[in-house]
Image (tube, coloured by chain):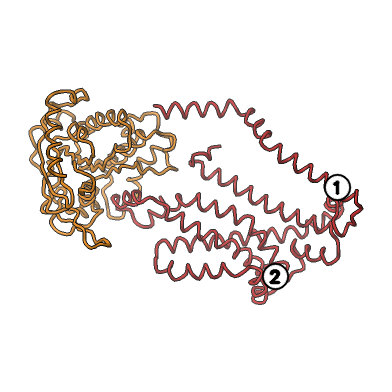
Chain colours: A orange, B red
C-alpha cells in the first residue's frame, strides 16, 4: 500500500482534494468588519502534503477552519472532494488536529481514539470505514500505553494520541493547525519524521499550518505562503526534495535554498 | 518515554511506601489530635476547678454521660434529621443540576431564571423557614424543602460553571465530528463539570444538615433541631451539647462520604489518584 500511494502521489493522481476559489472571510468585530482572508485561491492534490506558512494574524488558522466548516465563508468557494465544507464534515471526509491535543482527561488513550466512532452518527455517517484504534496507537508509536490517562502522558505523546484519533475514521484529508507548536524542538523533529511516515503509510491528504519555516519546508510537497491583513496568497512554491525525507536533509544546500526562498516570500508578505 | 518512566516510578513508590505513608498520615494528623485532647482536658479542669454550674457549661465528662444515659433520646431524634437532610440534599442538588443543564442549553432560560435564583438565595433561610412551615405544615416536608433550598444555590452556580468549563477547542472538535448537543452533554460537559459539582456537593453535604435543624427549630416536636430547643428551655446543658455534637458529627460524616465518593469518581484528576 505504501509504495502504491507514494507512486500515485509522485505521478499525480490528478484528483483535487481541496479546492479554494476566491475565498473571502470577514469577521464583524467591535471596530467594524475585519477582512481575515481576501480572494484566496489554491488547490491541494489528492494524497498531497501542503504546509501553510505566514506571519501571525495572517489568517492561516482561519483558512484551515473555513475548510473544516468551523468558520463561515463570506464569499468565494471551498470544495473538499467536490463537496461543500458542511457536506464533507457530515461525511467525515476530513479530521482536524488542534495545537492543543484536546484529549478527554477521564478517558484512556485508547478510549480517546475511539471518540469519533461514538459520536455524530445521527447524520448517517458510514462508520464501516474505520481503522482499529489499537493499530492506530501502534502506528503512532504508543503500543503498550493504551490504558494510560492523558495526564500520565507527555505533551508529545498526547499529540500522538490526538493524531491517532484523527486517523480513526480513515479521513481523506487531515487538517492540522500547528499541531507541534507547543512541543520542544527535539520532540517536534521526531514527530515531523513520524508524521511523514504516517502520511506515506495512510495516503491521506494533509494540510499543515505552521509558524516554522524549516518545518514547512521539511514536511510539505508544496508550501502556501500567506501575507498578513488581509490574508492573501503570496506564493505557492513546490518543494522538491528527495523522498522519503529524513531529518538529515535539513543540512543540505538544497534545503537551505528552499528555506531562504520561503523566507524571502515571507519578507514580502510582512 | 519520559512520562512512562515517571508514571512507572510513581506506581512503584506508591506500593512500596504504603506503610510509610500511613506513618506519614499519623504524623500529619497528630498535632490536631493532641491539640483537641489538650483543649478537652483544659475545659474539664476549668469547669471542675472553678465550680462552674452544669447548666452554664457542662464538663466533657458530663456530656459523654448523656451519650451513655440518654442515648435513646438522641438516637430517636437523630434519624428524622438525617432523613430530612438526605432528602433535602437529593432534592436541592437534583433540581440545581437539571436547571444548570437547561441554562447551558438555553440562554433565554438562564437570563429569565438566574436572577430569580439569586434573589431566592439572598433571602435568609431563617426568614423563609416560617413561611414554608405555614405552607407545608408541621411534617417532614418543610424541613426537606429548607434543606433543599440551602443546598440549591451553590450547586447551581458551580454546575453552570462546570458545564461551561469545556475548552472552545474541545467544542470545535465535537463540531468537526458533527456531534449533537446531547452527545456533547453526555460525552463532554457532564464529565467536565464533575470537579465543580463535587466542590458544591461538599458544601451542600454540611449545609443540608443545618437546613434540616433550622427547619426543626421553627415547628417540630422531633429531630435534633427540636431537641436543641427543648434542651435549651429546660436548662439541660449536657443534653444540648450532646445534641450539637451529634449534629456536627452527622455533617462531618456526610462531608467525608462525599469526599470519598469524589476520589473514586474523579480518579482521572491528577492528584486524586488513590
Indicate the secondary structure of the residue bearing disc 1: helix
**Image quadrant of residue B144?**
bottom right
Q: Single out the mark in the foreground, 1 or 2.
A: 1
Are there few (<14), some (14-19), or many (20+) residues within 10 Å of tag 2? some
- The residue tagged 2 is B139
Indicate the secondary structure of the residue bearing disc 2: loop
Q: Chain of mark 2?
A: B
In the picture, the quarter occupied by the N terminus of chain B is top left
- In the image, taking residue A205 as reference, residue A127 lies left or right, namely right
Query: Residue at 55% of width from left, 55% of height from top?
Result: B200
- A14 or B118, nearer to the observer: B118
Are there few (<14), some (14-19), or many (20+) residues within 10 Å of tag 1? some
Q: Is residue B5 shown above or below B30?
A: above
User: Which percent across, then down, holds residue B100?
Assistant: 47, 61
Sequence-first tag of 1 and 2: 1
User: Which percent across, then down, holds residue B251?
Assistant: 67, 53
Query: Residue at 17% of width from left, 54% of height from top?
Result: A84
How far is disc 1 from disc 2 in space, using C-alphas? 39 Å
- In the image, taking residue B172 as reference, residue A40 lies left or right, namely left
User: Which percent across, then down, holds residue A54?
Assistant: 19, 43
| Contact flag, marks 1 and 2 (Cβ < 8 Å) | no
Q: Is residue B133 shown above or below B95?
A: below
- In the image, taking residue B258 as reference, residue A138 lies left or right, namely left
Label disc, if present, on residue B44 of the rendered structure: 1
- A81 or A267, nearer to the observer: A267
Amino acid at each position: 500500500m505504501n509504495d502504491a500511494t507514494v507512486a500515485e502521489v509522485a505521478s499525480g493522481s490528478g484528483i483535487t482534494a481541496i479546492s479554494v476559489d476566491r475565498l473571502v472571510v470577514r469577521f464583524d468585530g467591535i471596530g467594524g468588519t475585519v477582512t481575515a482572508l481576501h480572494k484566496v485561491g489554491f488547490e491541494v492534490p489528492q494524497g498531497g502534503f501542503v504546509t501553510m506558512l505566514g506571519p501571525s494574524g495572517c489568517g492561516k488558522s482561519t483558512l484551515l477552519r473555513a475548510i473544516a466548516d468551523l468558520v463561515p465563508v463570506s464569499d468565494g468557494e471551498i470544495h473538499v472532494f467536490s463537496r461543500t465544507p458542511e457536506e464533507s464534515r457530515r461525511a467525515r471526509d476530513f479530521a482536524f488536529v488542534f495545537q492543543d491535543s484536546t484529549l478527554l482527561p477521564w478517558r484512556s488513550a485508547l478510549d480517546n481514539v475511539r471518540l469519533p466512532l461514538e459520536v455524530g452518527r445521527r447524520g448517517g455517517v458510514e462508520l464501516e470505514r474505520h481503522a482499529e484504534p489499537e493499530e492506530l496507537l501502534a502506528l503512532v508509536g504508543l503500543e503498550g500505553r493504551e490504558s494510560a490517562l492523558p495526564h500520565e502522558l507527555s505533551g508529545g505523546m498526547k499529540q500522538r494520541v490526538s493524531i491517532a484519533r484523527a486517523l480513526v475514521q480513515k479521513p481523506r484529508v487531515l487538517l492540522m493547525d500547528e499541531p507541534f507548536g507547543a512541543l520542544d524542538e527535539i520532540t517536534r523533529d521526531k514527530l515531523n519524521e513520524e508524521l511523514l511516515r504516517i502520511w506515506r503509510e495512510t495516503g491521506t491528504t494533509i494540510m499543515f499550518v505552521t509558524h516554522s519555516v524549516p518545518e514547512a519546508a521539511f514536511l510539505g510537497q508544496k508550501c502556501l505562503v500567506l501575507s498578513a491583513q488581509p490574508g492573501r496568497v503570496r506564493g505557492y512554491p513546490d518543494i522538491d526534495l528527495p523522498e522519503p525525507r529524513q531529518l538529515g536533509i535539513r543540512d543540505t544546500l538544497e534545503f537551505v535554498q528552499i528555506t531562504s526562498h520561503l523566507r524571502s516570500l515571507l519578507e514580502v508578505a510582512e | 518515554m519520559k512520562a512512562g518512566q515517571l508514571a512507572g516510578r510513581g506506581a512503584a513508590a506508591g506500593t512500596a511506601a504504603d506503610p510509610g505513608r500511613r506513618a506519614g498520615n499519623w504524623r500529619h494528623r497528630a498535632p490536631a489530635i493532641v491539640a483537641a485532647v489538650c483543649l478537652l482536658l483544659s475545659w474539664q479542669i476549668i469547669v471542675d476547678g472553678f465550680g462552674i454550674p452544669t447548666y452554664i457549661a457542662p464538663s466533657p465528662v458530663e456530656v459523654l454521660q448523656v451519650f451513655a444515659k440518654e442515648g435513646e433520646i438522641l438516637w430517636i431524634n437523630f434519624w428524622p434529621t438525617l432523613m430530612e437532610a438526605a432528602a433535602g440534599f437529593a432534592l436541592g442538588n437534583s433540581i440545581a443540576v437539571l436547571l444548570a443543564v437547561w441554562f447551558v442549553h438555553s440562554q433565554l432560560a438562564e437570563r429569565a431564571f438566574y436572577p430569580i435564583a439569586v434573589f431566592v438565595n439572598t433571602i435568609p433561610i431563617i426568614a423563609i423557614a416560617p413561611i414554608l412551615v405555614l405552607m407545608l405544615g408541621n411534617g417532614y416536608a418543610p424541613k426537606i424543602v429548607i434543606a433543599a433550598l440551602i443546598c440549591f444555590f451553590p450547586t447551581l452556580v458551580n454546575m453552570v460553571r462546570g458545564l461551561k468549563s469545556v475548552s472552545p477547542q474541545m467544542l470545535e472538535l465535537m463540531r468537526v465530528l458533527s456531534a449533537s448537543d446531547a452527545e456533547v452533554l453526555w460525552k463532554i460537559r457532564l464529565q467536565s463539570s464533575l470537579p465543580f459539582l463535587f466542590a458544591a456537593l461538599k458544601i451542600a453535604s454540611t449545609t443540608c444538615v443545618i437546613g434540616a435543624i433550622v427547619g426543626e427549630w421553627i415547628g417540630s416536636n422531633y429531630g435534633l433541631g427540636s431537641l436543641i430547643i427543648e434542651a435549651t428551655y429546660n436548662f439541660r446543658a449536657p443534653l444540648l451539647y450532646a445534641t450539637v455534637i451529634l449534629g456536627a458529627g452527622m455533617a462531618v460524616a456526610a462531608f467525608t462520604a462525599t469526599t470519598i465518593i469524589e476520589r473514586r469518581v474523579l480518579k482521572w484528576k491528577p492528584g486524586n489518584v488513590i
